[in-house]
Image (spheres, rainbow, N blue to C red):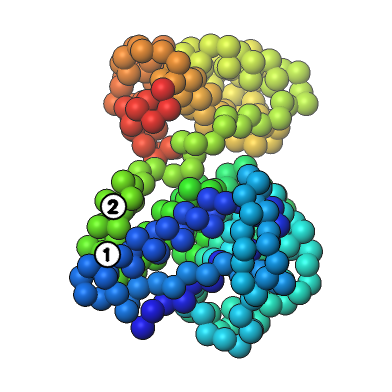
Amino acid sequence: MTRTVVILGYPGIQALDVFGPAEVFATATLVLFGQGRGEDGYGVTVASVDGAPIATSGGLTLSPGPLPSPGEPIDTLVLPGGIGVQAAQADAQTVAWLRRSSMHTRRVVSVCTGAFLAAQAGLLDGCRATTHWAFADALAREFPAVTVDPEPIFVRSSESVWTAAGVAAGIDLALALVEEDHGTEVAQTTARWMVLYLRRPGGQSQFAAPGWLPRSRRTPIRDVQELIESEPGGPHRISDLAARAAMSPRHFTRVFTDEVGMAPGAYVERVRTEAARRQLEETDDTVVAIAGRCGFGTAETLRRTFIRRLGVSPDHYRKTFA
């Protein structure tokens, strides 16, 4: 049977959150048709509370249909994000429909800030979820019952709910849903037709802007932070940093961690990683030279740190962002 996909529409929606998953499902349907299995494909509709035309955040106008009745079975319900998501959250009729309809839906999928809608309806309580890296802290603050992970491209938050990171991540998630429904061969063929990775390497950290923690309130710790940032390639031994702050190593480590939110060694590694990111983006220097200049010592140490922190190698990072 054709699988019913309903994409929830509202004013200020992000167009790619709608069209990205919709095109994956449409392409997968064509692939299945070519295999003589067209009846196993997807029927995609966009629906809103009153069925009136809605403007996307980019200025396009969509003509959705009305929302299905709450008891009508839906295979996949997609909750896109966009600048209008807060108004949609505050709309009692939208949230009430979402709560009732989710009980008759095989799976609910949020894309980007659509996670706020899923959380508002209580679908993410007690679950691990993701959203666009820039809104992860806000989601965690607004919904403390949700465990927010800003790193993954998408997460299976529960047996029936999936959450995806920002914008284009909805395409990644839709491909994963096709793979779950029809196997790797159909999903891989769909990805090839769309000139996409079936599984994108790495997580969101590689795309996130550098995020610096607030400065310590204590001048000695603040001075140490500035020293590390001005000389990321320096040795920065705990004993030397503690002496700079006029503290014993043990006391310095405790105070630094309390003030900054991470241990001195972790802070040094973070600063060095950000310095290496900038040099990979902005220079043509070799990975060996950048590793030495940023305090990693060897290219292998830099590679391991990048894979652990960003999920990709330095070479892959440079090819993507240089």
Question: Which label is found at residue 31?
Answer: 1
User: Do we see residue 183 in this rendering?
Assistant: no
Q: Position of residue 318 (x, y in %)?
A: 37, 25
Comparing 183 with 52, the one in front is: 52
Residue 68 against residue 152 in the figure, above or below? below
Residue visible at 73% across and 62% down?
Answer: 88
Residue 309 against residue 86 in the figure, above or below? above
Quarter holding the C terminus? Answer: top left
Q: Position of residue 228 (x, y in %)?
A: 57, 17
Question: Which label is found at residue 6?
Answer: none
Q: Secondary structure at mark 1?
A: helix
User: Mark 1–mark 2 contact, CB under 8 Å?
Assistant: yes
Q: Is residue 96 left or right of residue 288?
A: right
| Crowd band around label 1 with a 10 angstrom C-alpha radius: few (<14), some (14–19), many (20+) | some
Residue visible at 39% across and 43% down?
Answer: 202
Report which residue position mark 2 lands on.
193
Residue visible at 46% across and 24% down?
Answer: 277
Q: What's the amino acid at mark 1?
A: Val
